[in-house]
Amino acid sequence: MTMTNIKIKASMHYLKTVLDQNPEFIPSLILFCIGTIFKFLNLSFSYVFFVLSVLVCGFNVFVSGLRSATKLKFSEKTLITIASVGSVIINESFEAFLILVFFRIGESLEKIAKSKSKEDINKISKILPDTAHLFSNGTEKEITATKLNPGDIFIVYPFEKIPCDGTIIEGKTYLNLNAITGESLPVLAGVGSKVLSGSINTNSTIKIKTEKIAKESAAGRILRLIENGIKNKAKTETYINKFSRKYTLFVILTSVILFFVFLYIFGFNNFNKVLKKSLAFMVTSCPCSIVISVPLTFFYGIGKSANLKILFKGSKYLEALSRINTVFLDKTGTLTKGNLEIEKIYSFNKNFSNEDVLNICANSEIYSVHPIAKALEKKSNLEDFSKVKNIEEFPGFGVKAIMDSKEILCGNLKLLKENGVYIENTMPKNLMLYLAVEKVLVGGISFSDYLNEKSKETIKKLKNMGIKSVILSGDKTKITKEIANNCGISEFYSNLLPEDKLNILNKFKAKNLTTAFIGDGINDAPSLASADCGIAIGIRNSVVTESAGVVFLNNDISLLPKAIEISKKVMKTVKFNIFFSILVKMLVLSLAAFLTIPTYLAIFADVGVTLISIRNAISIKL
């Protein structure tokens, strides 16, 4: 099929859609054609058919416009109603018909554009199944997925989606996590494996114990992010919406004033000419092109981004990201792979073996979502975790717990020192995790992590965009410096607690720098919330995703330059559409001030510019 044929087919599709959305077009056009023929034959009642064609074509517009006017909430439909009726009064039914047809076409194209954007969002919105197979008392029952409660056991058959986060208690299978985490290859999961809602079971039947209800599970959080994203408007969009309400009333009042001024200047004998001038001013000044194109451009950008696994929680974050000049990055799990591996276990007390040190640390960190906890879980025996009680987590430090009536401290050097544990200077320098029992140091563990192969290229792209990168890490200076050097980052801060990261971020903001922070841990939440635009990598942690304004469904830092590029293109289009609309309207209004311009020129300044702006919005290449 040639490109010409494709364009013809697309045009026919749009035409069919416009006619489907506006079934009154055909009868109104028939009435208009009859009126034109009768007028050509000099039949006096041709005027009746013109009026009928306008009424049929604009009935819904008139009803909506008048309803708004009676409530003193003037809209663009109020302007179109006044302009159409005014044109009919001065026997310009053809122009009234054109005003209505082009306005309705503009409305239809806006709906088509929004529908296309919604399709991208709906693809992600379908990640949750509607039903679940509840297994209770040896029997299976199909229920609505939202009725599953923590502790319930449900069955997932091959090729079905998992409705809630939980733990596999029976069976072994491969899970497709692409819709949730973006992982391209199926992941093996068996008894004891944690699973996320929205994952697809690709192999064997499994039984899962529910841990979180559907709306609080991974897929549920994604859906909530999408819903909130549509509600949170950018400053530009919010201003345009507020401005349009007052501006519409201003246009109506100004048109009325101009009508009487022109009537005084040109005299009552030129009533039709004066009314035509006023109507041309009213139609030209209609804010449709801006009011429609600005929200549509943001909506289109958010929809297309969602298709790329980039969730903007509202147009205000898309606008903020377009202005950033400094990006702060967490190290572990952001620049590095975050898959920590135990490098070496140390025992400093003869009563504790290396295995004891590992198991006590793992059981103490059982509820933590930090990468260190995940590394401990892989290598340890978690069967005795019930012995660990009163676990208290201190983000950025570690945990405190009770085991066999003894106080356990498991965390970094600061945690132990602040709790009165004596640490000799001869301790290995590579230790990341220390273990103390009853204020006595008994062991430690060192870990290794590896640089994400995409980090270096990502930082290079940011630099080419003129954006400065800064590392904020809670890790040791030596390790942080090594990662910074490998990535090509000149400025970094290490040994930081969550409040330290926040303080550094705020110091940069005080210099009038526009900041973004990207991270994936609970200790990053304060900085994510404080930055002009917080970016969360992954959705495993609800605290992190709630604190951020942008969420990458994939644990992929390379999405950062793409997200910034999208935001800049969207804002560029928004600004161009506003500038272009105002420019054309000013030119036509200048002509209208000195000449009696045809109404179709005023229609172009309104509807024509609106159509061009809509096309600009949906033509952004992302």
Image: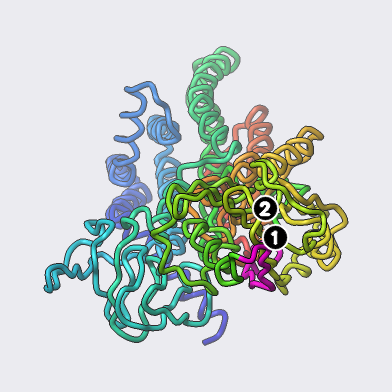
Residue 586 position, x and y percent, is 67, 35
Query: Is disc 2 placed on a helix, strand or loop?
Result: loop
Q: Earlier in the sequence, mark 1 or mark 2?
A: 2
Which of the pair 583/201 is nearer the observer?
201
Residue 482 position, x and y percent, is 83, 65
Residue depicted at x 77% and y 48%: 326
Amino acid at circle 2: Asn
Residue 456 position, x and y percent, is 78, 68
In the depicted structure, whether residue 261 falls above or below residue 120: above
Q: Quadrant of residue 132?
A: bottom left
Q: Which residue is mark 2?
A: 412
Q: Which mark is residue 48?
A: none
Amino acid at circle 1: Met
* Range of residues picked out in magenta: 331-350
Residue 504 forms part of the magenta stretch = no
- The CA span between labels 1 and 2 is 6 Å
Q: Which residue is mark 1?
A: 432
Residue 264 position, x and y percent, is 56, 12
How busy is the neighbourhood of tag 1: few (under 14 within 10 Å), some, or many (20 plus)?
A: some
Residue depicted at x 82% and y 59%: 426
Residue depicted at x 24% and y 74%: 155
